Amino acid sequence: MTAGRRWPGIVIAVALALAPGVSLSGENPSAPASGAPLTFAIVPKLLDNPVFNYARVGAEKRARQIGNIRILWRAPQEADAAKQVEIIESLIAMKVDGIAVSCNEPEALRGVIDKAIAAGIPTITFDSDAPKSRRLTYYGVNDLECGRLLGEALARETKGKGEVAMLTGMRGAFNLETRMEGVREALRRHPGMALVQTVACDDDTAKSVSQIEGVMKARPALAGWAFVGGWPLFARGALDPVDAKRTAVVSWDALPPEWPYLEGGKVRLLLAQRVFHWGVESVNLLVAAAKGVRLPRNSYSGVDLVTPGNLAAYRRMWTRWEDPAIPFGRDPLLKP
Amino acid sequence: MPARDSGAKVRALRFRETGIVVVLVVMGAVLWAVAPRTAAGESTFLNRENLMQVARAFSFIGIASVGATLVIVSGGIDLSVGSVLGLTVVTTAMALSAGWGIVAASTAGLIVSGACGLVSGALVAWGRLPPFIVTLGMLSIARGAGYWLSGGRMVSGLPDSFVAFGQGFLASVVPLPVVVMLLAMLAGAVALRRTVFGRAVHALGGNEAAAVLSGLPVARLKLAVYGLGGLFSGLAGLIYVARFGYGSSTAGVGWELQVISAVVIGGTSLAGGDGTVVGSVLGAAVIGVLTNGLTLLSVPEEYNQLVVGCVIVMAVLGDRLRMPRSLA
């Protein structure tokens, strides 16, 4: 066993992970692989969602870099907590070496996560937490804090004045509700602003586009929009009814199809989660856990705040993340 | 008896569409009265731009409901509408981004969607499996195939010429997706009402045993009906890609229920044998106007789904009350 020799590197890596906004990817990427391969199962909310595809790219690339790690990518076809429970039950039976899960519903997953921990399988959450479970750590954004950031960004862009609207996806989704609460909190600090309407598109891009049309029809003088997910911006022409001079739009997520909206000035700010790093850091954290390293309660990723001014820099980072040949480095978070 | 029955049926069909038109007019009048007005005093609901936007928004459901009407009138059901639409979206978008021409990429999308329909149709016709189960399987297969094909990636950066079609207008007034919907409706309505095929579909849905005994090619009819159902879903998928300029295997998740709702609101009987394509498109309009109205009126999103459900049930109920008891 060469685990003893790898200790210092892992301790440094975990210490770095504690510092908000510092990514430890790329740390010790060619660590010698030895012994039986480690099998880590990663369970996103569902298969069919592009953000998790980037996480998968990150996890598999990171696993190759470290070596001797096998990634099992397991998820329900649609976002379904009960299916996730079944999947994790079977992973426990398989005695995998670690599980990372993005929870569809925190309470529904709590029991099975605790069961995995009781079975001695290091289990962590990413993207969407189950805070009351015994998971070792959570990697991702603090939805409440980032919701506030989004709300503050909107207040800045509207100079703290005017009526604004908010777009969400599925009603009752834990992370979306938390983000919205953060936006509302931030807006309450600006007495000149009023959140006059919230629409829910059920995670359906087509529906979000027609809802924006409807709201802009009823409120042509709207000062701003906060989208707590990127749904409409995956489509082209979604903001045609929005006069960018009058209405400021800020949005969660910064996936490639959304970039032209920044370039065209239709969107002022995109709040980017580190979606590749959901996979990268899941692997890093599970490696550390497998070696018995004590993980912090939360490993917040921080967010990149992408604006027309720093889009080029973000695009360069993205290209590096996507390229299988370039190892993950330490990319500081982007500020406007 | 046959003559009297078909005469009564034709009158009932006309009556059904009148019913749904009344529902739409009432909804429109209410929205005209209560929706906010612009500074110039114009209704935010009842103006050309908003109505055209609403029509464009429900055009996908409208197009897909044409095919679904044929299936339901034949006594079947197609639960795979949304998934087949999604698979078509992925196929077409990937073909376009791989440099295929618009015609070739669209044809590929339609072939895939038609093939999905034919497979379902063959299993229903010759495998004698219940359509509910077959198309439930297809719902999963088509969605899974779309995911597998796209690897979960969103396809963007599609050619402007294609997107220009989805975002364009006829005579700068009518959005092109709406024109496509109207043409699809016309084709479907003529096929169902004025052709031998349409009468055979009605006969099949009305009484399958009688259809078999009277020598109708029942298996081939079923194959054709599900094949057409797939094709119309595919056409809706093409319009989706053109309108939104991106492709994702998540397009159209859950839309089968909206399509079936549109068909039922439009007066088509889920028991088969009776229904109209025009009614289904009007049913899609009811759902579209409702979504728009709730947004215009700022109905809090907590109540949104609740209201939609109630209005759908009331629309169908109101429609049924107008019908003679024997047809209900």
Image (spheres, coloured by chain):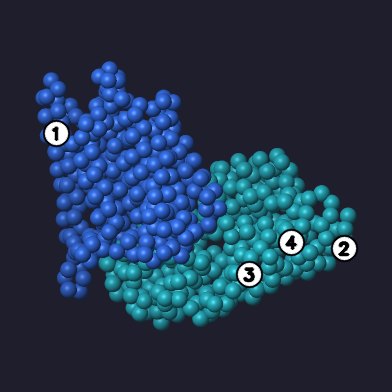
The Cα atoms of the two marked residues, 2 and 1, are separated by 85 Å
Q: Are marks 3 and 2 in contact (CB under 8 Å)?
A: no
Q: Residue furthest toward the top?
A: B213
Q: Is residue B149 left or right of residue A61?
A: left
Q: Which mark is residue A320?
A: 3
The Cα atoms of the two marked residues, 3 and 2, are separated by 30 Å
The answer to whether tags 4 and 1 share a subunit is no
Residue B84 picture location, percent across and down: 42, 45
Q: Earlier in the sequence, mark 4 or mark 3?
A: 4
Residue designated by label 4? A65
Kind of residue at disc 4: Gln
Q: Point out the frontmost of discs 2 and 4.
A: 4
Q: Residues within 10 Å of mark 1 (few under 14, many from 20)?
A: few
Kind of residue at disc 2: Arg
The answer to whether tags 4 and 3 share a subunit is yes
Give the colour of chain A.
Answer: cyan
Q: Residues within 10 Å of mark 2 (few under 14, many from 20)?
A: few
- Chain given the colour blue: B
Tell me the chain of label 3: A
Q: Residues within 10 Å of mark 3 (few under 14, many from 20)?
A: some
Q: Earlier in the sequence, mark 3 or mark 2?
A: 2
User: Element type at marker 3?
Assistant: helix
Residue B148 picture location, percent across and down: 54, 48
The Cα atoms of the two marked residues, 1 and 3, are separated by 65 Å
Tell me the chain of label 1: B
Residue B191 picture location, percent across and down: 23, 38
Residue designated by label 1? B10
Kind of residue at disc 1: Val
Kind of residue at disc 3: Arg
User: Element type at marker 1?
Assistant: helix
